[in-house]
Amino acid sequence: MIHVIPSGHNEGVSKTNILRIAERIPDEAAAYEYLEQLRWNGSPVCPHCGNEDRCYFLTPANGKSRATRTGKPTQRRLWKCAACRRQFSVLTDTVMHGTKIPVRTWVFVLFEMCASKNGVSAREIERKYGLCPRSAWFLTQRIREAMKDDGLGMFVGKIVADETWIGGQPRYRHGHKAGTGGQGVTDKTPVLSLVNTTTGQVRSKVVPDVTGATLRKAIAERVNMAASVLYTDSGNQYRQIGQEFAAHESVDHHVGEYVRGDVTTNHAEGYFSQLKRSLDGTHHRISVEHLPRYLAEFDYRYSTREATDKERMGDLLHRVGGRRLAYRPLTRAASGA
Ligand SMILES: [Zn+2]
């Protein structure tokens, strides 16, 4: 499921915290080395051609820094591939590619976003690390992008499906297509979450409405239905979908039934309450447009909740490859986050 880097997790000897990281990376070169350790585990892999063999470090003349094209010194650590002869750094082809934000700052923010239950707001990052609002926002969104599910496999197992309503921003009141959930017209955004209680993973998705057809489509994208068991509340929409599963069990919330044997939707309810607490408390206003990235962040932390913060950070670096995110598409509605 996740790449776990050895860290003595069970012995509790290597509890990482932000102070230890600060000691470990006193400067930019050390921050690069720290990321190299997490991403490559000591043996660099060329991001251009995938070669793992005999990539060598281009030691700067003074041992620590080199001059950039403009003559400014940089501590950026460069490697050269023995196969394709091209240069690379640990940032090449990751969401950090071409960043102007110090790599030390990236490491701190990566860690905070991996470690904090409720997430970290761009505002907080801006204040703490002295970044401009745009940089802080961009940095947190890029890390969320790396947390996005990378499409590995379909869910198979015991699947709890449940939907919730997030939101409501005045400026979206007119433009946003309102969904109806039996509660009349609303400007809130429906979100479907699928919790695989067999593997402990969750995937959430913004859906246009909560009709049976829409939910079926979203579930079919994520779940091998014929090989799984579906757990839901007694919502009518799930009746027909349930027939495509190996079995379908439901609890009837209307008559106060929440758990019957191992039939329950409590996993999803727990997930939703954490999500909403955080969206209200930490982020305040999130536009519908950016909601999928926040969902990805929460899904990611939930799905890796058994890992230590450092393991989660290592895993995140394994999946950042090839996920550059251009500045432009992200900033169209930057003010909303
Ligand atoms: Zn190469």
Image (cartoon, grey):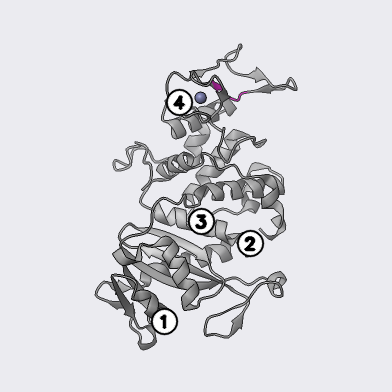
Name the element at disc 1: loop
Q: In which quadrant will I find the C terminus?
A: bottom right
For disc 2, the marked residue is 289
Above or below, 16 against 300 in this view is above
For disc 3, the marked residue is 296
Structural distance between the alpha carbons of marks 3 and 4: 31 Å
Instruction: Tell me the amino acid under the disc marked 1.
Output: Gly
Mark 2 closeness class: few <14, some 14–19, many ≥20 residues within 10 Å? some
In the foreground, 227 or 112 = 227
Q: Are marks 4 and 1 in contact (CB under 8 Å)?
A: no
Above or below, 298 against 63 in this view is below
Point out the tag, 4 or 2, that comes first from the N-terminus. 4
- The answer to whether the beta carbon of the residue marked 4 is less than 8 Å from any atom of ligand 1 is yes
Structural distance between the alpha carbons of marks 4 and 2: 38 Å
Q: Which residues are magenta?
A: 75-79
Asked which quadrant contains residue 257, the reply is bottom left
> Does the magenta stretch mainly form a helix, a strand or a loop?
loop
Q: Is residue 78 magenta?
A: yes
